[in-house]
Image (cartoon, rainbow, N blue to C red):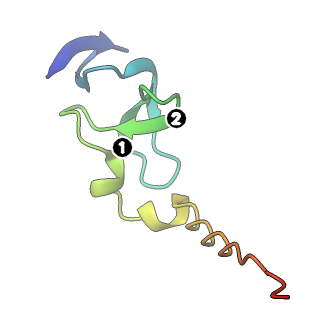
Amino acid sequence: MSSLVQVAGVWWNVPEGYRPQQARPCKSCGQVILMAQTPKDKWAPLNPDGTSHFSNCPQAAQFRRPKPSPAPEATASRDSD
């Protein structure tokens, strides 16, 4: 489910639970995108159709964060007496 909202003279299809904040040009490709906060309070760049701008931005890779390293496995050392 999504809702249609108008921001900066453009109609945007915003996914349910997302809070639209501002429309602005993408820093790399220049397309106008809507920055919205997700239900988990993370920022998401959206295209007017509600899809993630990362899906069609030619320079999306430069904005990706590196995946966190897996947590080291906890090894319990036991003394066997």
- The quarter holding residue 75 reads bottom right
Q: Residue at x 49, y 55 (%)?
A: 28
Label 2 amino acid?
Lys
Mark 1: few/some/many CA within 10 Å (<14, 14-19, 20+): few
Q: Residue at x 44, y 64 (%)?
A: 59
Q: Is residue 47 above or below residue 54?
A: above
| Residue 68 percent coordinates (x, y) | 61, 66
| Residue 27 percent coordinates (x, y) | 53, 48
Query: Tag 2's secondary structure?
Result: loop
Camera-side residue of 15 and 58:
15
Camera-side residue of 56 and 64:
64
Residues at discs 2 and 1 in contact (Cβ within 8 Å):
no
Q: Is residue 81 above or below residue 65?
A: below
Specify the farthest residue to the bottom. Answer: 81
Q: Is residue 6 above or below residue 80?
A: above
Camera-side residue of 31 and 41:
41
Query: Tag 1's secondary structure?
Result: loop
Q: Dot 2 corresponds to which residue?
A: 42
For the question of whether residue 19 can be seen, the reply is yes
Specify the farthest residue to the front. Answer: 81
For the question of whether residue 56 can be seen, the reply is no
Label 1 amino acid?
Gln
| Residue 31 circle label | 1
- The quarter holding residue 39 reads top left
